[in-house]
Image: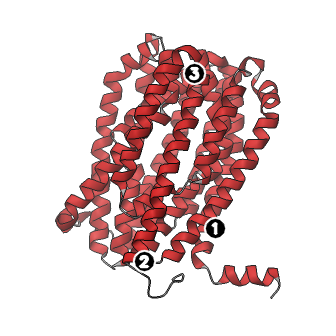
Amino acid sequence: MSLTQKISTYWQNNPILRRISRNFGYLFSSNMLAAGLGMLQGIFSARLLGVPGLGLLGTITIFVTVINKLTSFRMGELVIKYVGEFHEKKDSQRAAALFKAAALTELVASVLAFGLTWLLAPLGARYFAKDTSLTNWFVLYGVIILANLIAESSTGLLQFFDRFRRMAGLNILQSLVTLALTILAWWQKTGLQGVLLAYLVGKAISAVGLTIAALIEASRRWGKSWWKTPLSLLKEQASQLVKFAISTNLSSSLSLISRDSGILWVSYFSTPTQAGYYKLAMSLANYIQMPVAPMPQATYPELSRAVARRKWDDFRTVIRQGTWIAGGYATLVAIFLVLLGKALIQILYTPAFLPTYPGLVIMLVGIVVGSAWYWSRSALLSFGLADYATWVNLLVTVLSVAGMVSLLPRYGFLGSAVVYTAGALLGNSIVVLKSRKELRRQQELFPSEREGVPE
């Protein structure tokens, strides 16, 4: 056969690849469009706020996000894994009960997170923003937590049932609304308040939309009375579910400390200007991360299915193809940013942001590695090894905190860039090695009777 015929035959005989490609295609196209809209939004925000103002914007939004995630149990991951298991066993009652339990847990956690935001806002304004007059803006942006009451559980359900098209549509709608309101803020010269409200409204629309779509999907799958399913059906799995939820929460919390809250560390140890450089660097890095970000969402359900069905060839194929696609894309974009990043910053964001460039180059190393191995954590979760991921995150967190305390007071944003890349290299390497080892162990314990891809 010709190469074209071989590719066509492989495509026709590989439904998992077709399904991942379709789902990824929805999210990739929406994220690419969102990236373009986000770039315009970032330019208007940067030109309106300047370097210090952009740093304050990032400080407020990340402060609220960190508090929200600290109380989060990553219910989306739990829903994908265990609704998936019950669905494969045709146990719709337990699947409905699991989604109900996840949603209720997330709702309570969200209310708690908003309360903590309200209480801690004065401290955030004083120690991170260095301006106590911004306290009310910390609280106002915290309203986004209430909009996300059960957004994680909803996202997990939509992912498992392949409703990626709806998620993509909501992502685009959010970006359009945020951009329109940001341009309005720039036109009216409303400053930080206007841009912050633009972020808030856009994200709230997306969160509420995801919740409504998931509730509709649950009713379609399990009937309109699914929410009446007794939680007692999960009694046998209770300890397992609690362990998984706590492990993912701890893992997420540790990631917040070592990686996701980088701008808060810069704000605390340095100045809003240094935080502005960090904010812009992460925005530029999003041109790599945004297209890759949907891949764990599209891949994790397939990895979970492969483990549940003991289809190890399918598992290996998914991670191998994902590494080549994500790693290749990330490398190309990183090269582009290294070569043209300085000119891009000077022309689009003004010369005041040029000190961002050296730190961006340092961060790109860690971002490329993390993008290529985007599946590493999903692989561990599909094997039920959430606790191992937590221990790895603990190690990375301890080392990262030590690095930030040592480097940030002297080097500011550049120190945070070094810590970011070192943590990404260490954490991803350990998790990938463990995933491969566990795959070999599982294959020895539970060899497939027939390797292949189920329709």
Across and down, in percent, residue 309 comes to 42, 78
Q: Which of marks 3 and 1 is nearer the N terminus?
A: 1
Which residue is located at x 52 percent, y 58 percent? 297
Bin the neighbour count of mark 3 within 10 Å (Cα to Cα): few under 14, some 14-19, many 20 and up: many
C-alpha distance separating marks 3 and 1 = 37 Å
Q: In this view, does 431 lie above or below 442?
A: above
Q: Quadrant of residue 102?
A: bottom left
The residue that label 2 is drawn on is 310
Query: Is 29 left, or right, of 305 in this rendering?
Result: right
Amino acid residing under circle 3: Ala
Query: Is 300 left, or right, of 87 in this rendering?
Result: right
The residue that label 3 is drawn on is 275
Across and down, in percent, residue 139 comes to 40, 25
Which residue is located at x 58 percent, y 62 percent? 165
Question: 95 or 397, which lies in front?
Answer: 397
Numbered mark located on residue 21 in the image: 1
Question: 416 or 441, which lies in front?
Answer: 441
Which residue is located at x 56 percent, y 43 percent? 425
C-alpha distance separating marks 3 and 2 = 47 Å
Across and down, in percent, residue 452 comes to 54, 83
Q: Is residue 276 above or below residue 319?
A: above
